[in-house]
């Protein structure tokens, strides 16, 4: 699923939930964050292992 070039917001949120993250580091809910912010967080948590992290 996460090997796609462009992840949508729902996919990013699902990925973060699978890594047991339930809010943004600043306390906001995921739906309040931009796709870019969500992508930055998932890339950080996975050490850039997904293709989308290298854009």
Image (cartoon, grey):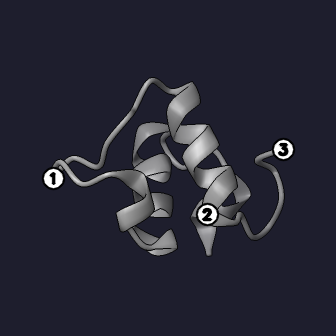
Residue 9 is tagged as 2
In this rendering, the label closer to the viewer, 2 or 3:
2
Q: Nearer the viewer, residue 5 or 15?
A: 15
Q: Which residue is mark 3?
A: 1
Q: CA distance from mark 1 to mark 2?
A: 18 Å
Which of disc 3 and disc 2 is earlier in sequence? 3
The residue nearer to you, when weighing 31 against 4, is 31
Left or right, 39 with respect to 29, comes to right
Q: Is residue 45 left or right of residue 29?
A: right
Which numbered disc flags the more N-terminal residue, 1 or 2? 2
Residue occupying image coordinates x 24% and y 54%:
28
Q: Residue at x 33, y 51 (%)?
A: 29
Tell me: residue 6, above or below residue 2: below
Q: Residue at x 38, y 34 (%)?
A: 22
Q: Residue at point 81% right, 50% down? A: 3
Across and down, in percent, residue 54 comes to 61, 67
- For label 1, the SS is loop
Which secondary structure lies at badge 3? loop
Q: Position of residue 39 (x, y in %)?
A: 50, 61
Give x and y (percent) for residue 51. 72, 58
Query: Distance of mark 2 from mark 3, alpha carbons?
Result: 13 Å
Marks 1,2: beta carbons within 8 A = no
Residue at mark 1 to residue at mark 3: CA–CA distance: 27 Å
Residue at mark 1: 26
Q: Secondary structure at mark 2?
A: helix
Of labels 1 and 3, earlier in sequence is 3
Instruction: Bin the neighbour count of mark 1 within 10 Å (Cα to Cα): few under 14, some 14-19, many 20 and up.
Output: few
Q: How many marks?
A: 3
């Amino acid at each position: 699923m996460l090997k796609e070039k462009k992840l949508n917001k729902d996919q990013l949120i699902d990925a973060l939930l699978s890594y047991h993250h339930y809010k943004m580091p600043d306390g906001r809910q995921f739906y309040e964050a931009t796709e870019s912010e969500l992508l930055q967080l998932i890339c950080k948590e996975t050490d850039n292992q997904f293709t989308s992290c290298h854009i």
